[in-house]
Image: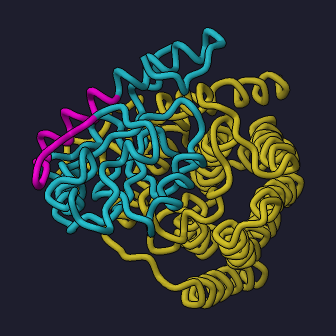
Chain colours: A cyan, B yellow
């Protein structure tokens, strides 16, 4: 059954983002974009979530937090790095306190660059993440390890 | 015959309850100027939850949540089989106590706050539910649901205070604003989602299905007030639910203290007046 694609619940975490991307994430929930029409819910609880939407870059302070949220999510799960900072560290990449993009800590499935990302891009990225989610579910149903990325 | 009704409830109530939840979400979205999810979205959600990995915080929570679902279904089944209304009320209370225990099973501050708020909620609406059962007894002379439903006169005329009081707590039972203090359909990031914090996958799915059972049971309870005419009953129950959706969208959540005080004040005064009037003027 492919219920997984029809009901993707999101947990959104702001790494060290400037809040630009986070405001765009919230814009997706407004009547103009209304991501709930795809069954998307912003849960705020890793134990209920399927997609980890993470913004900002990795630093020593948030490393543990990101890992912790990721570990608490039940399989199958997908990580979407939102904004150029989450993808690669962006303009902060060379800063002494920044370690780079989210893929330094957790496996990222979908990269959605932009500064900030536009709501259209976010929705497009989440729809791409749904494909990965469904793939992982099928792999899990076949008794394989969902963690392995193709 | 009665057993058939109980089986019909056990099979059909999740379908009907899920559909009601879907229509609810669609109407809520429209009231907020949004397109909203498909009407079948609640079924997709539960289907998805069943597909997820079964992550467990404390093993006992599975037992408590399963027992919660079983007792909700049991109380609804007794109700629709025409059984004893008091048994229904007490089984329902036990079910909610089991949910609270499930939330307390995991050592998590969010879960604990949620459990405590669920207990406060239980404390707030329980007197009204018991008084409603008493009201039905005084009006019809029976606690049996089948006899109450077969009562030839409109109970809404005999029990207007009980009806309004029960409608006041219906908001809380359906987990809608302004009394959605233990858990809510909307505030996913807030502390009010506390009671389900530590549930995931199929355990969370069971909580959802239990809510569908309970929705159908509650609408059945309101049916009793109009049971003398099924057509009017269907219309009245539909209007009541639409009113709840509107109230949910038009009001903000209140603090738990105010919720408790106002529910006790409104329900106790209204039902006491109603019961006294019924005793003194007979009504029969």
Query: In the rendered structure, does residue B62 fall within the stretch colored magenta?
Result: no
| Viewer-nearest residue: A27 or B219 | A27
| Viewer-nearest residue: B265 or B183 | B183
Residue at 25% x, 43% y is: A35
Query: In the rendered structure, does residue A125 fall within the stretch colored magenta?
Result: yes
* Residue B225 x, y percent position in the rendering: 61, 56
Asked whether residue B240 is in view, the answer is yes
In this rendering, the answer to whether B134 lies above or below B19 is below
- In this rendering, position of residue B238 left or right of residue B152: left
Asked whether residue B75 is in view, the answer is no
Assign the N terminus of chain B to one quadrant of the image. top right
Residue at 76% x, 51% y is: B57
In this rendering, the answer to whether B117 lies above or below B200 is below
* Residue B28 x, y percent position in the rendering: 31, 52
Residue at 37% x, 76% y is: B252
Q: Quadrant of residue A81?
A: top left
In this rendering, the answer to whether B172 lies above or below B242 is below
In this rendering, the answer to whether A104 lies above or below B94 is above
- In this rendering, position of residue B208 left or right of residue B45: right
Range of residues picked out in magenta = A111-129
Residue at 60% x, 43% y is: B208
Q: Quadrant of residue B135?
A: bottom right
Assign the C terminus of chain B to one quadrant of the image. bottom right
* Residue A59 x, y percent position in the rendering: 38, 63
* Residue B256 x, y percent position in the rendering: 58, 83
In the displayed orientation, state which residue is furthest to the top.
A142
């Amino acid at each position: 059954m492919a219920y997984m694609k029809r009901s993707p619940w999101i947990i959104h975490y702001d790494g060290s983002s400037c809040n630009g991307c986070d405001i765009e994430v919230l814009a997706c929930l407004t009547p103009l974009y209304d991501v709930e029409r795809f069954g998307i819910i912003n849960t705020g609880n890793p134990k209920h979530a399927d997609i980890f939407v993470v913004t900002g870059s990795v630093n020593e302070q948030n490393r543990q937090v990101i890992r912790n949220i990721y570990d608490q999510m039940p399989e199958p799960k997908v990580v979407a790095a939102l904004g150029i900072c989450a993808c690669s560290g962006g303009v902060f990449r060379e800063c002494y306190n920044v370690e780079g993009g989210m893929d330094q800590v957790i496996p990222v499935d979908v990269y959605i660059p932009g500064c900030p990302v536009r709501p259209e891009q976010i929705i497009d990225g989440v729809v791409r993440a749904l494909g990965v989610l469904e793939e992982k579910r099928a792999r899990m149903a076949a008794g394989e390890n969902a963690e392995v990325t193709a | 015959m009665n057993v058939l009704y109980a089986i019909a409830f056990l099979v059909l109530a999740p379908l009907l309850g899920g559909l009601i939840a879907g229509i609810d979400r669609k109407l809520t979205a429209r009231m907020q100027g949004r397109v909203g999810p498909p009407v079948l979205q609640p079924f997709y959600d539960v289907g998805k939850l069943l597909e997820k990995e079964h992550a467990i915080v404390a093993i006992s929570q599975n037992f408590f949540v399963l027992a919660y679902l079983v007792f909700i279904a049991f109380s609804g089944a007794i109700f629709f089989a025409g059984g004893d209304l008091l048994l229904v009320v007490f089984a329902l209370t036990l079910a909610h106590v089991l949910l609270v225990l499930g939330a307390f099973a995991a050592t998590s501050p969010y879960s604990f706050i949620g459990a405590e708020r669920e207990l406060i909620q239980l404390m707030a609406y329980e007197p009204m539910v018991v008084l409603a059962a008493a009201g039905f007894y005084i009006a019809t002379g029976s606690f049996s649901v089948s006899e109450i439903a077969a009562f030839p006169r409109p109970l809404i005329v005999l029990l207007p205070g009980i009806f309004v009081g029960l409608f006041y707590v219906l908001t809380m039972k359906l987990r809608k604003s302004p009394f959605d203090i233990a858990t809510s359909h909307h505030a996913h990031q807030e502390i009010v989602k506390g009671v389900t914090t530590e549930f995931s996958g199929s355990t969370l799915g069971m909580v959802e299905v239990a809510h569908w059972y309970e929705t159908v049971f509650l609408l059945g309870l309101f049916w009793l007030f109009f049971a003398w005419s099924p057509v009017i009953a269907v219309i009245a129950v539909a209007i009541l639910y639409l009113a709840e959706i509107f109230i949910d969208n038009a009001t903000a959540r209140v603090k738990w203290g105010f919720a408790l005080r106002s529910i006790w004040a409104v329900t106790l005064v209204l039902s006491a007046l109603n019961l006294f009037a019924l005793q003194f003027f007979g009504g029969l």
